[in-house]
Amino acid sequence: MIAWSLPLVPMVAGLAMAATGGRVPEGRRRRVVGATGVAVMFVTLVLAGGAVVVESSGSHDVGGGLALHVAAGGLPGWAALLVSGVATAVVAWAAAHEDVDGLGSLLGLLVAFVGAMLLLVVADDLVTLVVGWELVGIASWALIGHRWRDPSAPAAAAHAYNATRFGGLGIVLAAGATFAATGTVAFDAIRLLDGAALGVVAAGILLAAASKSALVPFSPWLFSAMAGPTAVSALLHSSTMVAAGAYALVRLGPALEPVGWFGPVAIAVGLVTALAGGVVALLQGHAKKLLAASTSAQYGLMVVAVGAGYPVVAFLHLAAHALLKAHLFLSAGVAREAVGSHDLARMRLGNQLRSTAWLAAVAALALAASPPLGAAWTKEEVLAAAAHDAVWIGLAVAVAGGLSAAYATRYHLLAFGGRRHDGPSPRPAPLRRPTGVEVAAMAALGMGTVALSVLWVPSVHEAVVAGLDGELPTPAAWELPTSLALVALGAYVVWSRDRSGRLGHVPAVGRARALADWLGLPTLTRHVVVTPTLALAHALAQVDDRVVDAGVRGVARTATRVSDLLGRRVEWSVDRVVAAMAGGVSRLADVFSRDGERAVDAVVAGVARVVERGGRDVRRLQTGFVHHQYVVVAVGVVVVLAAAILGR
Amino acid sequence: MLTTAILVPLLGAVAVAVLGRRWSDGVARAVGVGVTIVPLALVVAAWAAFDRSSPELFQLVTEVDWIPTLGVGYRVGVDGIALAVAGVTAVVFTAAVAHPAETRGIAHQYVAWFLFLESASLGLFFALDLVLFYVFFDLSLVGMYFLVSRWGHDDAERAALKFFLYTFLGSLSLLVGIIALGLSMDPITFDMRAIIDAQPLAAAGHAMVVLVLVLVGLGIKTPVVPFHTWLPAAHVEAPATASAVLAGVLLKMGTFGLIRIPYAMMRETFADAAVVVGIVAVISILYGALVALGQGDLKRRIAYTSVNHMGYVVLGVAAAGSVLTGDEAARGLALTGATVQMVAHGLITGALFLLTGSIWRRTHDFDLDHYGGLLATVPLLAGATILASFASLGLPGLAGFVGEFQIFVGTFAVLPVLAGIGLLGIVITAALFLQLLQRLFLGELPEDLATMPDLDPVERTTLAGLLALVVLIGVAPRFLVDTANAAASILVGG
């Protein structure tokens, strides 16, 4: 019961809000739609709480041997709680912050988006996973394209959808392989597989996760997703869409471990993304894109943990990241509203927006993985998991952690640092300040981040991990000091550059700019995938018209010529046949009318008219022997049938 | 029951043609809808009377001798697949007749040809005799020819002729195959049930020749690449309502025939050729999607997506027939999926073409470059198009997903490589529909479209009817899946 209502309540309510929200008068819309959205999210949150406590499951038979299965409780329950908790704060913030024009559809779609994500969370088989996956994708398409009058927004939305749909095909492949071997697509059935079939499943799931979690080479779609409103980014990066990929890996990773290459490939993809994302974030001058690159990097770390065999560690890092990243995006939205731009070089709002700056500092410290915040503990566990696989992988994770500290510091100093004396002149007052609801939403997320600090307490994290049926890596003595040293180093380098006035944004030209745009990946994708596909499509469209059809037209021309020759002779005989048939029917009518059957007469005469008309049509078609013959036969059949009907 | 469903629209066609001379456009269409409701109700009744657990493939059979010496008879009956396709036929015809169109002052003839065509279509899906099947197959060409040539756009005569000659060529090829099948029976009979039981060509040397003839005939109708070039021409010139019927119903005759004749009657030969059929299907899937993406004309783009979507159906049938025994569950799923996909494509593409008709009524323009930003101007038209496009790109919760997922999962067990390659078509379809929506409804609004009127009540009703079924099949497909599965599980021998 809970397992079904958890996704369906927000999905149905959200769609209803999207459909009707625009009819609420603008003056009351923010209050009415906002309150509805928060209420729905609150109900969902309560349901998620129930899902943590009570095991529940359900199924929906779709026939043909397939059924949708959902199950809540354990990991899915906690994930649902995380998703709906973060979403409640984001929806409340959006209700207070976003434009009132289109607010109904925005909040409605946000709520439905959460519902789709919850379906993915409670999915217990690969069909349900695909369904949730695609619904999350299409909801994000609508949300990223929310400002649809701007032509660039829909294109960006399509980029996000197409990239993640491509990856989603991996799950369909996985479903095909599982069904072929076991006759079902249940998650449990994956454990029964071996050999090539399991390899296909592992490849499919990894491909899907890489696309959704914006790992290399799919990362650039996350930059396109910036076209959406801030609340959309906040949700999409934290507990929905992007989280879907890592969540699927957490859920299915243990079953895929027998595949020899799965762990190493996952670690490689994750590590490359973590390091590359860190570099991109250090170079970005766009507030949201900096955060987006850091999202890819953090998800890279989660995938490393899954690859190393510790999915529960990945999940805990996902949870800590969800809280801090939603918070950071909301703060970026407030900053953007204040200066009218996402340009980090124009912000430094620490003196003007004190409360937002202080709250954001908590999230930035968490992103930097500073103890005693929970996000630091989860990162250390990722490091321990990686080092468990090989020491150099652990060291690489520590370097990625140093980069996190550097870009988190950089983001906070540029967005919410104090004004430098030699910086640009202060903005004219008044700034748009966050409302109480916005601050409360950010504060709630901040409190969540702080509350996770209890994970450092051994008895707490042991209980949590045991509750999630997972285990923890045993850390080596060198790990924590090394990791903390790198964090401190990363933060210090950025801080000292700021002190010496060299922490501007990236120059608008040259190599740095190209690197900041995801190391040139978007350009590569455009040249290797998008442009060739479109060019091929247009070329084939031409070929189809000119070449494939040409043979057909050639045959047609020949036939026309032949028919011209035959036509003169055949025309005459066809006319005769038609005339004879029409005459025959007319004579039949005469017979009936002599018997005084007026009604019958009318019908038969009508048939005669139809036949005559048909005859005229036949004459109109100057097209050839076969064709003429054929129409005559067809009309004849109609007449015969009509006669048969009359005879009944 | 089935015979009445064939006869009522035929009688209606004659009656409307004779009596309706002075009827206005609205009256003629209203009478037409009144007639199409009857077969719709009868198909629903047949659906209710159909026993899904029966071991008999065909039910509700009626049989009357026609030419006994040649074993030709009027034989009608249904299996789950025929029932499903007949259902979509009855629905799409009702919507197409009801939907507003430019009838050029001869509305009674317009309606009459639709009714005639409905009779031929239902007759084909109900036929249990190969000759009867062939007669209806050809009559459908006649009906469509006149609808396109008389009520089509500028170049309609030429397009209609191309459609006619091309598909007629296909039907001749089919005819030769049918005769070969009938003559191979001893005594000669064209009774489908007897031929399915006997598998007369199983050991014959010329079986592959017959199979190729039949496949070409049906392949032209479906159409598969490279026999598809009549399709965009006919669709672009046809009135939108006729396009809805052409895509929604007539294309199904090709794939329905594929299941009926080569798959069911020539199992061993078909299994030998299944990989080739599957390759042609995958080429159709990818080529159709790519060429659709390259189109700047709204109607041509939708027309080419039919090549793509029918490719999925052919792939499903090829997978189901690729081996004679083994993998029954997967092959049954592929065949069920092919049937569901036929129904889904009929409803979705029917709705999409009716929408192109609504757009044409308002602007007389199909060039996508001339559109944009209409979302707020015509919210209902945009909403219906978005929903239909989502369904067409295979979004879960809507009809298109169900069949495609079943086809791919089922096909993977027997033809994994083809299934994997075919999957790529799904991404291209998504890209082309999202781009289509973007070019029609998002971005900047051209000034001349600022006053475009939204859907009128009749348009709303027809589209709501089709799209409601699209959602129903997407959310609760069991009524359809179980019916299709009743036939599929018998046909795959499970």
Image (tube, rainbow, N blue to C red):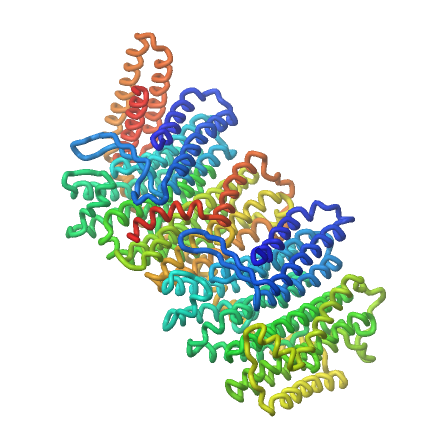
Horizontal side, residue A52 vs residue A576: left or right = right
Looking at the image, how many numbered discs can be counted on the residues? 0
Q: Nearer the viewer, residue A169 or B117?
A: A169
Residue B98: percent from left, percent from top:
50, 33
Q: Nearer the viewer, residue A639 or A90?
A: A90
Q: Which quarter of the picture shows residue B182? A: top left
Residue A394: percent from left, percent from top:
56, 86
- Farthest right residue? A429
The quadrant of the rendering that contains the N terminus of chain A is bottom right
Residue B282: percent from left, percent from top:
36, 57
The quadrant of the rendering that contains the C terminus of chain A is top left
Any part of residue A221 in sight: no
- Farthest bottom residue? A478
Image point (32%, 10%), residue name: A593
Image point (35%, 16%), residue name: A605
Horizontal side, residue A137 vs residue A357: left or right = left
Residue B368: percent from left, percent from top:
53, 49
